[in-house]
Image: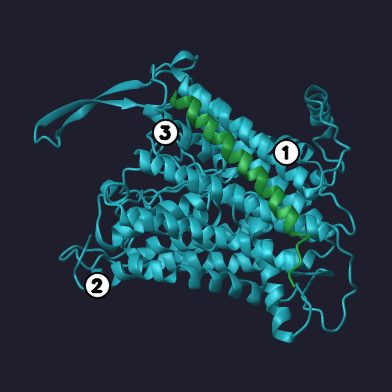
């Protein structure tokens, strides 16, 4: 670890905290329908969209109507993406003449992008045409993030409103989130990326002649001399901006943000990380403003920062350690090398920015990577996995992070109520049996999917184990990470396993689908129930949700739920691998 | 044929999710003795 590395980490979180309030205030204005500087430009577009689609923006929806509208929208856009993938060989903007995507992979990818997961069981530059990337996938980067935003706003309205049955209008929230928040920032961000060297074109791939031909030995033992390299390109910058801002994470290229055309400079790396946390941090401020308790928003943001710091510091420390199995190699940090574990990392980012990126991308449900998590040390690789296992609430995905965190807040105030023997209240609303039932449903679906699917994959040699390239505890980590990433709608891969098989494509698709929609429904049910409640005036016995004690309790509840649920699995995976590495074994 | 089956499975999954919405809503009125 170095002072330089720590300074960059501090600079990053300082920038996030500085931007949280302006972003949050802007989100509040957008979703409360107040005037913004973009209204003259976007107001007519919004009204035109409503006229064309027949949406009546003044009509409010109950939580069930809101949920059904969200499901209908997701179903329609999912089928559209599936069709584009299957038919891409017949559609324009396919200069490489790529064939239609195979059905299982097309289904997996359509579900993946609809659920904001962006898990990729394929190599994008050799599988997806430009049209598929733009119309099939990048549009989902906007839509799935806008759906998350809308759901978070609906939850916040549920808390803020009193004695009403409605949470707003899904179509209005979806439209305003896309037009006022995601599109303008993405356009500015894409231009900034282009200025740094991210490509944006529709050309066919170039072929470059290698200065030094390379020899490659195939699996059949035959040696081939490689004399040329294909330079993939395309409309990258426009997809890259929303990929990060919308916490989507699906790369235009297989190497994702480790590819120099996606993430060419330290500045783009910094901006990419910043854009992942920008909206989730702003949403906590929006929560505080909309419920009339700004300090409550800051208390939640503080819990997120504490958990982010714990993960980042652990990962940075673990990756700065030398590999004990590399004898006679200088692995110390110096002016000429990063030191530590540089396998699978870009030298232009080094240890600090690779560890920080890994923590940020898995705290939020982004899933973009600038280093290969599979090559991290066992404890360093455990951090991204634990970040997702905590429920993607540490900043979390756009919208999804806030509503997930609010379910934990309800659990925290419930536990506080149990401790003092008093009916729990949250911002003046009594938390009752139904809220806890739905909260527990939300919390239990997550481990059920991850551990259930991982157990089946481990027990079925022909299905799960057959795709592994590493065995022992590292193989278990790869399987566990895949289902964790899918269910948590993160999308990053630990790699090391071939996921483009029928088993993995279908099982991960099911995990992504249920991990998204089966968790959203009970969350909206809580919101709908809260909206109908009366406000009880605070008394001396009310547990305050604006204090450091609340932040501590909330952090404790998140860690304990995650630790108790997943510790046995983690102890057989990364923890065991760490101990065996120290004893001289590698996998 | 595969495409038709997969799209049918998707629509079934979303219909199930719709029923799940209804189930969660009905649960609200349930009281245990």
Quarter in which the N terminus of chain A is drawn? bottom left
Q: Colour of chain B?
A: green
| Secondary structure at numbered mark 3 | helix
What's the CA distance linking mark 3 and mark 1?
A: 27 Å
Nearer to us: label 3 or label 2: 3
- Give the residue drawn at x 67%, y 51%: A521
Q: Residues within 10 Å of mark 3 (few under 14, many from 20)?
A: many
- Select label 2 or label 1 by which is in front: 1
Q: Nearer the viewer, residue A553 or A193?
A: A553
How far across and down, in percent of the image, does residue A45 sit?
Answer: 79, 26
Q: Name the residue located 63 percent from the left edge and 68 percent from the top edge.
A: A303
Residue A8 in picture, x, y percent from top left:
50, 59
Q: Earlier in the sequence, mark 2 or mark 1?
A: 1
Report the chain holding disc 1.
A
Q: Earlier in the sequence, mark 3 or mark 2?
A: 3
Residue identified by numbered label 2: A582
* Tag 3 near tag 1, CB within 8 Å: no
CA gap between label 3 and label 2 equals 41 Å
Labels 3 and 1: the sequence-earlier one: 1
Compared across the picture, whether A149 is left or right of A485 comes to right
Chain A, hue in figure: cyan
Q: Residues within 10 Å of mark 2 (few under 14, many from 20)?
A: few
A441 or A473, nearer to the observer = A441
Image coloring type:
by chain
Marks 3, 2 in one chain: yes
Q: Is residue A362 left or right of residue B17?
A: left
Residue A286 appearing in the image: no
- The image's mark for residue A227 is none
Residue pictured at 65% horizontal, 66% vertical: A408
């Amino acid at each position: 670890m170095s002072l330089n590395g720590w300074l960059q980490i501090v600079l990053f979180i300082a920038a996030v905290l500085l931007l949280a309030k302006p972003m949050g205030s802007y989100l509040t204005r957008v979703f409360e329908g107040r005037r913004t500087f973009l209204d003259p430009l976007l107001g007519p577009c919004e009204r035109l969209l409503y006229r064309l689609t027949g949406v009546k923006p003044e009509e409010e929806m109950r939580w069930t109507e809101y949920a059904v509208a969200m499901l209908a929208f997701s179903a329609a856009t999912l089928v559209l993406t599936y069709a584009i993938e299957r038919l891409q060989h017949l559609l324009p903007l396919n200069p490489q003449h790529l064939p239609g995507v195979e059905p299982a992979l097309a289904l997996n990818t359509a579900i993946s992008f609809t659920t904001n997961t962006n898990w990729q069981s394929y190599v994008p530059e050799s599988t997806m045409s430009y049209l598929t990337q733009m119309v099939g996938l990048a549009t989902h980067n906007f839509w799935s993030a806008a759906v998350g935003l809308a759901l978070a706003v609906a939850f916040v309205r549920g808390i803020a409103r009193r004695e009403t049955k409605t949470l707003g209008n899904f179509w209005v929230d979806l439209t305003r989130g896309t037009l006022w928040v995601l599109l303008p920032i993405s356009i500015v961000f894409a231009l900034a990326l282009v200025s740094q060297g991210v490509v944006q074109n529709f050309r066919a791939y170039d072929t470059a002649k290698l200065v030094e031909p390379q020899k490659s030995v195939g699996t059949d033992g035959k040696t081939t001399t490689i004399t040329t390299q294909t330079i993939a390109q395309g409309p990258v910058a426009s997809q890259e901006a929303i990929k990060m801002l919308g916490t989507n994470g699906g790369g235009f290229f297989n190497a994702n943000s480790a590819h120099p055309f996606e993430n060419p400079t330290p500045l783009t790396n910094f901006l990419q990380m910043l854009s992942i946390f920008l909206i989730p941090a702003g949403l906590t401020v929006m929560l505080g403003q909309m419920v009339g308790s700004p300090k409550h928003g800051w208390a939640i943001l503080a819990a997120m920062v504490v958990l982010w710091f714990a993960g980042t510091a652990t990962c940075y420390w673990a990756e700065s350690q030398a590999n004990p199995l590399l004898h006679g190699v200088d692995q110390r940090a110096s002016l000429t090398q990063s030191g530590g574990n540089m396998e699978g990392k870009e030298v232009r980012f080094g240890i600090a920015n690779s560890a920080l990126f890994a923590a940020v991308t898995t705290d939020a449900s982004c899933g973009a990577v600038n280093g290969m998590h599979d090559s991290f040390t066992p404890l360093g690789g455990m951090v991204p996995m634990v970040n997702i296992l905590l429920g993607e609430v540490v900043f979390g995905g756009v919208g999804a992070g806030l509503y997930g965190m609010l379910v934990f807040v309800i659990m925290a105030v419930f536990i506080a109520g149990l401790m003092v023997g008093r009916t729990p209240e949250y911002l003046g609303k009594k938390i009752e049996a139904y809220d806890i039932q739905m909260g527990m449903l939300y919390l239990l679906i997550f481990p059920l999917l991850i551990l259930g699917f991982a157990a089946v994959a481990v027990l079925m040699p022909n299905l799960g184990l057959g795709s592994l390239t590493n065995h022992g505890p590292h193989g278990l980590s790869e399987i566990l990470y895949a289902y964790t990433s899918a269910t948590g709608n993160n999308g990053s891969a630990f790699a090391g396993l071939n996921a483009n098989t029928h088993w993995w494509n279908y099982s991960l698709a099911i995990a992504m689908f249920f991990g998204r929609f089966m968790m959203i429904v009970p969350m909206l049910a809580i919101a709908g129930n809260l909206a109908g409640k009366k406000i009880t005036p605070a008394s001396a016995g009310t547990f305050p949700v604006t204090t450091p004690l609340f932040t501590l309790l909330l952090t404790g509840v998140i860690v304990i739920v995650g630790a108790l649920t997943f510790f046995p699995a983690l102890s057989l995976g990364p923890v065991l691998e760490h101990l065996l590495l120290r004893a001289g074994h590698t996998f | 044929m595969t495409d038709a089956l997969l799209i049918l499975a998707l629509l079934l999954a979303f219909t199930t999710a719709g029923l799940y919405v209804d189930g969660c809503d009905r649960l609200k009125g349930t009281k245990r003795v």
